[in-house]
Amino acid sequence: MKLTAISLIATAAVASAQSGSPLNPALPPTCETTLLQQLSGGDFISSCGLQNLITAVIAAGGSRTPTTEAQSYALASKLINQADLDLMCSDKCNSAITTFGSTVTAACGTTPLLNPTSVADGASSFKNLQAGDLPAIITYARKGFCVKDNNTYCAIALLAAVQAKDSKQMCTPCAAKEYDALKDTSSLPTYAKATVDPTLADAQKTLASCPAGSLGVGVAATGGSTTPSSGSHLAGSAAVGIAAGVASFILA
């Protein structure tokens, strides 16, 4: 699994005073200060239900990559729950994202946020991540988080299904709705699209193989195996994921 981009930046901001900080050393000091203020208790974090997630990342000692599936699921559950998703999907969060974006962009400019030498190979495309990209990435991921079926957040059900390795849950109306919510990646930066689009294509193939009628009314399925391919977890965890990519907003 991958941490959300926002978690990565949060950890970097908190660690900015330490040697080997994952933040780009070329960033102006005001940028690091602003990121720390915004991500350690700013209105964006509280309004969008991210406080528990950020606290868990920091409590983990600044580790940016969970080393086991259990750690990944535990981290995801800090956001994928009813109370925090209600906040994430609120109008107040939408407004807070806009304010957060303008604040960090003013402080950080167009300088890439991450130290290229600290970005893991699997997230190498995000070495180009700029402050101004964060609102678009967060908003994209938010579309997946807020999908509902029968008035219930699909992210909660699909996280449980992925955790249980229940392939049948990949062929449900929720899985199809998650794909529909995230299939338009035109709002993402080019480097993020390069990460997300192949996973979406893989998810589409898996959904197309689901038994006829399993995805709900009006959703095409050809029938066939319901065993998800290695990349098809987007259908089950796109809402889980973040990534600002997100992306790394996607846990897979």
Image: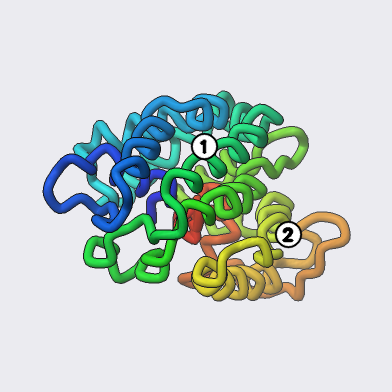
Is disc 2 placed on a helix, strand or loop? helix
Q: Residue furthest right?
A: 218
Mark 2 or mark 1: which comes first in sequence? 1
Q: Which disc, if any, is residue 180?
A: 2
Quadrant hosting residue 157: top right
Q: Where's the N terminus, which quadrant?
A: bottom left
94 in relation to 119, above or below: above
**What residue is drawn where x is 76% and y is 70%?**
221
Q: Which disc, if any, is residue 107?
A: none
**What residue is drawn where x is 41% and y is 28%?**
52
Near-viewer residue (129 or 102): 102
Q: Position of residue 27 (x, y in %)?
A: 32, 53
Q: Which disc, if any, is residue 80?
A: 1
Near-viewer residue (149 or 62): 62
Give the side of residue 81 with respect to residue 108, left or right.
right
**What residue is drawn where x is 62% and y is 53%?**
140
Q: Position of residue 35 (x, y in %)?
A: 38, 39
Quadrant hosting residue 32: top left
Q: Which amino acid does the dot numbered 2 rest on?
A: Asp
43 in relation to 234, above or below: above
User: Can the viewer see residue 176 in this picture?
Assistant: yes
Quadrant hosting residue 10: top left
User: Can the viewer see residue 161 in this picture?
Assistant: no
**What residue is drawn where x is 75% and y is 58%?**
215
